[in-house]
Amino acid sequence: MFFPKPEVVKRAHIKNYEEVYKYSITHPEEFWADAAKELSWFKPWKQVLHWQYPYARWFVDGETNIVYNCLDRWLKNDRKNQLALLWVGQDLEVKKYTYEQLNREVCQLANALRSLGVKKGDRVTIYLPKIPEQIISMLACAKIGAIHSVVYSGFSFEALKTRIEDAQAKVIITANSYPYKNKIINSLEKTLQAIKDCPSVESVIIVNRISERVKIPEDIFSKINFYQWTELLSKQDTLCSTQIMNANDPLFILYTSGTTGKPKGVVHSHGGYMVGVYLTSKLVFDLKENDILFSTADPGWITGHSYMTYGPLLNGITTLIYESVPDYPHPGRWWEVIEKFRPTIFYTTPTAIRALIRYGEDTPSKYDLSSLRILGSVGEPINPSAWLWFYKNIGRESNLPIMDTWWQTETGMHIITPLPCVPLKPGSCFKPFFGVVADVVDENGQSVGKNKEGYLVLKTPWPAMLLDLWQNPQKYRETYFEKIKKKTKKFLYFTGDSAKIDDDGYFWIIGRNDDVIKVSGHRLGSAEIESALVANQKVAEAAVIGKPHPVKGESIKAFIILKKAIQPSEDLKKELNLNVRMFIGPIASIDEIEFVEKLPKTRSGKIMRRVLKAQELQLPVGDISTLED
Ligand code: WTA
């Protein structure tokens, strides 16, 4: 256990988790209504929560707009002069926007979208790299009640096309090209390829991230109007009315992968999502007026929506965005950005931490990281060795608390997460956030008890939960509410993750249960075995898959990237196997180890075990549009 320093607790919004938690689950509606009252509403809600299987609706009949709370309300006081957005380019070029300046540009784009015929409920696809215009676009859509669908810039044109078609987007906002390490990525070319056969698209707005303008082959696109961002905006008024939205009107669609190949469009709301993201940002990162939050996510993913865009702005703080990857042009780049721009909160992923571990402790030690107050991790289980490295080398002697936040695109907000005031265990994401009851159950929905692996489920609704899957209510019901066999229509949300709860009530996420391997009937999580492997000092990264085995059902194969200067050998294979046997037990013995230089990963850093498995078994690889390399 790592106990918080008294000064951290003293400063924190929440000083006693258990006490507030108890109140929040006995009085969830009062708890969430109090949070909602900290924000502005055009019309108050009639009912805090309405549950009718399988939909939970929050703040029923309330009227608001998330952008009113992110921008408009700050313009009435001194906060308007505070930095809202601090953007740092790959070459350390800086762009700064105060709340007032950000609002001005959002208004101009909102007016431009209205002039292109975009109305409340229309969809706009945003296919931009990590530049300020990405955030401005999201806010401008929300301001006029259009539904934004951000597509990660690393996606291929095929993936983009699927998402435009599914959402039937009217307008696409894209860039000409952008720098990515020492390459230039031409995003306009990908956009043009994608929209060739998308009849819903009426207009395309192009941001020139790189100075040159690209010529549009107008004969092919005679039905589509193209606009340059700067020219279009320069004609617009800097004032724009904010559309009044019902709390349960959709704010955005974000496509995410499920167990099947086709992405699912997760839909979030203006009201509930706003309240959930506002409160979790405030309490988990313990936000105060002068905080600067550096999240290394990309707005193309949910973290970029909730904790890079909406969460910080709802709290009136500064969001710091660095355009590029951690180790380009040198392995200390993120630490250099921290030294220079002095963020107080640093939120990243276990994969990034493990990748940076490879460069050794000397790299971060050269930089002044003293501005940091809170660290965060998200996206996958963080193995204790990576946690400890983060704690020691980035948190340093200040013993900064690490918020290992468990949540999903669907949950919209942190669900199982520590707060700065609680004792931490490396590798555990602590306990449920306020108002949330979570459990680990078997396939019939029965609690499995302490220290046993099972399905992680949520037993109470929370405000930022998805409204639905875009035009696919059946899949929504099947994926989240029908996987567990049960007789009643009581709320029971299936997360798709496996977890354990320990004697102290701490949750330990094992991984997605679609990556479960069954060896001689024993269920093992790929992530669990990988954690055992990366605990070895010589290992940088590991990926584990199950392979059909004639006797045991499945056998385990591990792909290992060694740290620099470590030589592969048969002895090392034995050592690694012993590590795994020691961490999990002999049932987890690895049958095969292959040392590799690279692993197939998405550009956000998740290892694509599915691709490894398909390659290994010589099966079709399926959709690899999210693959980085
Ligand atoms: C995993 C990312 C362990 C989990 C915000 C979940 C985590 C999936 C953690 C959702 C964490 C996320 N510890 N696992 N702190 N955070 N996950 O939709 O398997 O991209 O179901 O949302 O990431 O991924 P998604």
Image (cartoon, rainbow, N blue to C red):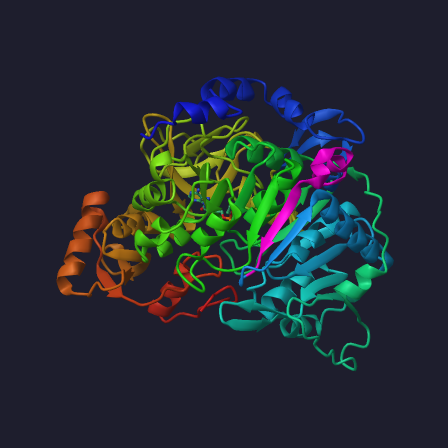
Q: 509 and 362: which one is in front?
A: 362
Image quarter of residue 601: bottom left
Residue 455: percent from left, percent from top? 42, 39
Q: Is residue 88 magenta?
A: yes
Would residue 604 be found to the left or right of residue 118 on screen? left
State whether residue 480 is above or below residue 231.
above
Q: Residue at x 31, y 68 (%)?
A: 597
Q: Which quadrant is the N terminus positioned in?
A: top left
Q: Which residues are magenta?
A: 70-89
State whether residue 510 appears in this view. yes
Residue 432: percent from left, percent from top? 47, 30
Would residue 208 be found to the left or right of residue 415 on screen? right
Residue 517: percent from left, percent from top? 33, 52
Q: Residue at x 32, y 26 (%)?
A: 503
Q: Which quadrant is the C terminus positioned in?
A: bottom left
Would residue 295 be found to the left or right of residue 356 on screen? right
Image quarter of residue 333: bottom left
Q: Is residue 144 magenta?
A: no
Q: Residue at x 41, y 32 (%)?
A: 430
Q: Residue at x 68, y 31 (%)?
A: 58
State whether residue 266 appears in this view. no
Q: 496 and 189: which one is in front?
A: 189
Residue 581: percent from left, percent from top? 19, 47
State whether residue 241 is above or below residue 500.
below
Furthest toward the left, the residue is 571
State whether residue 13 is above or below residue 167.
above
Q: How many marks?
A: 0
